[in-house]
Image (cartoon, grey):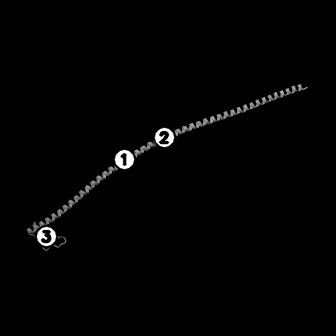
Amino acid sequence: MHKLREGAKGKVVRTMGKKGKKDAGDPKELSKDEEFKRASVLNSTQQILLAKSNDEVARMQADVHRANNEADALRVTLQSEREATIAVTSDLSRQYKSMQNNLTQRIGELEDSLQKSADSNAMLKLQLEQQEGDHLKMQEEHKKEISELNQRIEDMTQDFSDMLKETLEKMSQKISAQTQSVDESGEESKP
């Protein structure tokens, strides 16, 4: 491959690249027209390479700009999702705390109600036991009264029986006495 370089006297000379062989002897000196043409070609080539490099740089800058826009959009999306997640989490936490407070209050009310019921049951049980005691006492008193009345009835029956016997005996004695007196008077009147 041929390369152009500036010679010792300021002239452009052509040399061989690494792979090529050097011309035998000194490099040829080029005329000014050839130098100009070669410089012009070199300039055009460099401008083409520069344009390509500029296109690549512009493309890369556009890619970087697009990537930055996408990253910004992703950041915005991520931020809005974070905010939505925070809002949902906050709402769920609020609902959980509200439900927990409601349940705690309900448990307290039920415990109070249960305690009142237990107290009421204890009072009713005490009253029932007292009433049962009073009822048993009344039953004992009634049994005692019935027993006393039965005893009085037996005593009265015995007294009545004794009185009736006594009356019957007296009546029997009177009847016997009268029968005797009638018999005696009848015997006297028979002569």
- Measuring from the top left, give residue 65's x and y in whole percent: 23, 56
* Kind of residue at disc 1: Asp
Looking at the rendered structure, the secondary structure element under dot 3 is strand
* Residue plotted at (65% across, 34% down): 142
Disc 2 to disc 1, C-alpha distance: 32 Å
- Which one is in front in this view, the residue at disc 2 or the one at disc 3? 2
Disc 2 and disc 1 in contact, CB within 8 angstroms: no
Using the image, tell me which numbered label, if any, was put on residue 14.
3
Secondary structure beneath disc 2? helix
Mark seen at residue 91: 1
Q: Residue at x 8, y 68 (%)?
A: 33
Q: Quadrant of the C terminus?
A: top right
Q: CA distance from mark 3 to mark 1?
A: 80 Å
Measure the alpha-carbon separation of dots 2 and 3. Answer: 111 Å
Mark 3 burial class by Cα count in 10 Å: few <14, some 14-19, many 20+? many
The answer to whether any part of residue 11 appears in the image is no
Which residue of the protein is positioned furthest toward the left in this rendering?
32
Dot 3 or dot 1, earlier in sequence = 3
* Residue 181 position in % (x across, y down): 85, 26
Earlier along the polypeptide chain: callout 2 or callout 1?
1
**For the N terminus, which image quadrant?**
bottom left
Q: Amino acid under label 2?
A: Ser
Residue at screen point 25% across, 55% down = 69
Q: Is residue 73 left or right of residue 120?
A: left
> Quadrant of the rendered structure where residue 104 is?
top left
x, y (%) of residue 58? 20, 59
Asked whether 106 or 181 is in front, the reply is 181
Q: Which residue is mark 2?
A: 113
| Residue 75 horizontal side relative to residue 136, left or right | left
Is residue 59 at all visible to an observer of this figure? yes
Q: Amino acid at mark 3?
A: Arg
Between residue 12 and residue 149, name the one nearer to us.
149
